[in-house]
Amino acid sequence: MTEKEKKEVTEVSEAQIAVHWQEEGYYYPSPKFIAQANMTDETIYDRFSLDNFPNCFKEYADLLDWYKYWDEILDTSDAPCYKWFRGGLINASYNCVDRHLEKNGNKTAIHFVPELEEEKTDHVTYQELWVRVNEFAALLQDYCGLKAGDRVTLHMPMSAELPITMLALARLGVIHSQVFGGFSGKSAADRIVDSGSEYLITMDAYYRGGKLLDHKIKADEAFETAAEQGQNVKKVLIWQRYGGKYSAETPLVEGRDVIVNDLLKNYYGKRVDPVPMPAEAPLFLMYTSGTTGKPKGCQHGTGGYLAYAAGTSKYVQDIHPEDVYWCMADIGWITGHSYIVYGPLALCASTVIYEGIPNYPDAGRCWRIAQDLNVNIFHTAPTAIRALRKIGPDEPAKYNYDFKHMTTVGEPIEPEVWKWYYKVVGKGKAAIVDTWWQTETGGFLCSTIPAVKPMKPGSAGPGMPGIHPVVYDDEGHEVPPGQGIAGNICIQNPWPGMFQTIWGDRDRFVSQYFERYCKNPDSKDWRDWPYLTGDAAVVAEDGYVRILGRIDDVINVSGHRLGTKELESAALVVPEVAEAAVVPVKHDIKGVEPDMFIALKPGFEASEALAKKINDALITEIGPIAKARKVWIVPDMPKTRSGKIMRRILAAISNGTDVGDTMTLANPEVVEAIQKMASEG
Ligand code: PRX
């Protein structure tokens, strides 16, 4: 990051530490790729220009089957809560399953790859998917009494049953809220309470790193914590892991816990007609971290979201029905929702779901899966690429797979890492797209249409067709492209994939994402409501966007978003802790990881045991991804005279960079003490 860019970023944020590279030259896709690409027409950017907004998005809506075609493409009467394709009736499950049966019933919809290589891969055809979705929908309707508009929390690991569950709920118009399987039971509980879910759907166990993890135990914790907060879960539905009997050690609670596989026997052969849902009806909630301790439920609608997931899967992911597509993300994140489940299945592709970690049992696992299943489109995150590069730089060459297309998502990717991905993983043949987007946005914001725009290592690319980014400085002035100056990247216009609101908290939705650069709070015109992404970015002369990282209180560890307030609240659960402050620290593989600074209440002493207790609290409250690199118990926090903790200084100490001027602090002496601690490790 140049001095000029640094100046623009005033608060401590990843943007200050994570990105330190400059622009690189272009790379071009092969003629072979271009010849088969879904989108080669350069006029797409004109068709999706602001002059043609919002009608341009009809092109995406027309990729779907509608029970009733919509009347109005964009209803802004409640701006910035927008309704896309108003008047339309549609069902997501129908679009991802039923409509493919006639031509492609025998085609594989899902390849589920268990982590243990001795277990067989499950190839689920579209016909079989339809049967399983119908039977489970019948159970949900009949046994649980679920109906359109109800919410159900899912806390499931990677399995074929996860999309089956999502699609069964979507068939009924029930809103699903899947919580990342690696999160704790307590995290699941927060989401159960916030969404008002009366049912929790989980799985008994799953393999990770060669170990069978008891996952059901988390349901007990979720149930109890939710009950303490006044939300009564009526039933816990437990899927048995692929091929297994009930394998978790945790006993079932009578009257509450039900094994889905047993109950399903009563519904064999049952069919449920998909419920035609209004286009703007919510399809799912996806909770994500923000600037407060409370995760927010991003509410995604049915017609707009599905149209955007399908359209971007077709043009950016270049998915054709004959492709075998593998996205290594977890379905518990938005990437998995849009680009493992909804996008690929809407386009009738075969989507791969892998249960485990990429390097189990060895560094060649990923490339073996790709070879054995004939994967030709591959999608992963820089963290995984860095890790795979480190453990097995020459592994890909040993396997006989052939990627035409690869994606990187979730964090900025260093040009060096990009080039390894291109040359070694893609064997110099695959087109790469770097896709920048967010849980809130439902689909890509910036990337390249691979046969239309060249690739540029380290840069995500221009705004997607129909997405018009703009960079503002802190005073609200536009930063023009090509100046090399960083600022807050916003999107000028709404788009069909964007979230509709924060579940139950419209005020927070407006204040967090729109207020900062809103031109007129009473306006019903979308032009007055630029969407604030929370990222810092630099836009080059050619319109390519280089994302520097979060500028707000969020840190992105291995592509997983964690709120600093969320981490700090988890540390404060430990009774000895008076104050907690989290900062991002640069890490070779994970991009950044959290360092936790702690000040104790009077009368307590720092010790290794206490530091461990605090780190354990992060794991129990949130999950293993929240573990701090280091817990520093400090004599006091560096503070401004008004009492604000100076995280910028803590971040500088952790990252070994210059702490800058400390004279304006109320307690400058404390900085030296912390520096001494850090230098002694
Ligand atoms: O900071 C950006 C980073 O991840 C954030 C969004 O995280 P989440 O909502 O969990 O969604 C992750 C999957 C889309 C963004 O605000 N981010 C995401 N993709 C990229 C990225 N940073 C740089 N380059 C990307 N391609």
Image (cartoon, rainbow, N blue to C red):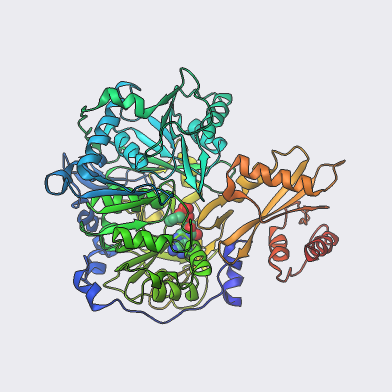
What residue lies at 32% left-to-right and 67% top-to-bottom? Answer: 401
Check the picture and name the quadrant holding the C terminus: bottom right
- In the rendered image, residue 119, in percent from the top left (x then y), is placed at 38, 47
In the image: residue 234, left or right of residue 263: right
Residue closest to the eye, 503 or 601: 601
Q: Can residue 594 be seen from the camera position used here?
A: yes
Q: In the rendered view, would you say 172 is above or below 70?
A: above
Classify 612 as above or below 456: above
Residue 52, x across and y down, in percent: 24, 61
Q: Which of 646 and 591 is in front in this view?
A: 591
Which residue is farthest right?
603
Locate residue 323, reporting x and y percent. Answer: 24, 59
Q: Which image quarter holds the N terminus?
A: bottom right
The residue most toward the top is 255
Side (left or right) of 340 relative to 188: left
Please give the count of numbered marks on the rendered protein. 0
Q: Residue furthest bottom?
A: 25
Residue 519 visible in this rendered orientation of the protein: no
Q: Which of 374 and 173 is in front in this view?
A: 374
Q: In the figure, residue 480 lies in which quadrant?
A: bottom left
Task: Single out the residue that lies furthest toward the left.
Answer: 102
Q: Residue at x 76, y 42 (%)?
A: 577
Counting from the top left corner in percent of width and height, residue 482 is at 45, 78
Which residue lies at the image location 81% right of the left edge and 52% below the top edge?
A: 636
